[in-house]
Image (cartoon, rainbow, N blue to C red):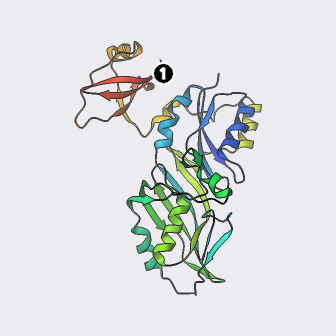
Amino acid sequence: MINGIINLKKEAGMTSHDAVFKLRKILQEKKIGHGGTLDPDVTGVLPIAVGKATRVLEYMTESGKVYEGQITLGYSTTTEDASGELVRETPIKAGQLTDEQVDQAMSSFLGEITQIPPMYSAVKVNGRKLYDYARAGETVERPQRQVTIGAFVRTSPLSFKDGLCRFDFRVACGKGTYVRTLAVDLGAKLGCASHMSALRRTASAGLQLEQAHNLSELADKVAAGDYDFLLPIEYGVLDLTRVDLSDEQKQEISFGRFIDLQTEEPQEQVLAAFYQGHLVAILEKGNQIYKPRKVFI
């Protein structure tokens, strides 16, 4: 059985599920999952876990992500991105907005903010995904959610053409953030219709786009018997606080017993337990001691 983490460079036109399906065929492995869904039109880093590494997928999904893309001001769409149908137009004249106005509006989204997920999303309401309601022409009240924005900056000059204003951006954000909704909310703050016109994920779960492999590259490597693209399971817990165990503690963990860790307060609720450089368990705090939630030995 193959075990490890793959830094996949997802291409446009496929869902995250499609990417996993194709990888199952390439690797001849059934136990594969992805950490953090990407919309079909979005490219970039898609963390993949294979074999035993699927047990750390939830921690990869929780990790922060970095995206680069383009926002278009001047019209909005049904899907909040370039693939949707036009909903509203607000033509923008050249010079109508300044760099300073856009930058100030972007900075107002830093920290913890409230988002309403787009209708074309996989968020479930009453047991149905929102995009099922949207495709049926139905509307439903969408739940608000709190998300965290670590950075949201413009990375190109404003470009005015044909009643539109476009610019590139970079955003660092936490779990559950809809970047296309961020683009729409930014437009609203600037008093115009808007949408996200391009997006790629450049980092996720500690994986960087520069080191990612696309499906054809992975297929060629597997055909040649080269598995150097497989990263150790430890990459799946990079965002967790690490604790190194003694021989005795490692032995206790192997028996599924609770252990007392003399760590400084405040103690983390979840820890990644290592022994001699390797992940041996995920520990969960219970009162003043830790119990093994997942054991890898």
In the rendered structure, the answer to whether residue 277 lies left or right of residue 209 reads left
**x, y (%) of residue 295?**
45, 21
Image point 45% across, 51% down: which residue? 174
**x, y (%) of residue 49?**
58, 34
Quadrant assignment, res 107:
bottom left
- Mark 1 closeness class: few <14, some 14–19, many ≥20 residues within 10 Å: some
The front one of 176 and 106 is 176
The front one of 296 and 13 is 13
Residue 209 to residue 52: above or below: below
Quadrant assignment, res 72:
bottom right
In the rendered structure, the answer to whether residue 94 lies left or right of residue 270 reads right
Image point 67% across, 42% down: which residue? 17
Question: Which residue in the protein does label 1 denote?
Answer: 296
Task: Report helix, strand or loop for mark 1.
Answer: loop
Three-letter amino acid code at the position of disc 1: Phe
Residue 79 to residue 242: above or below: below
In the rendered structure, the answer to whether residue 213 lies left or right of residue 101 reads right
Residue 27 to residue 195: above or below: above
The front one of 100 and 184 is 184
Image point 30% across, 20% down: which residue? 259
**x, y (%) of residue 30?**
68, 28
**x, y (%) of residue 21?**
71, 37
Image point 66% across, 31% down: which residue? 227
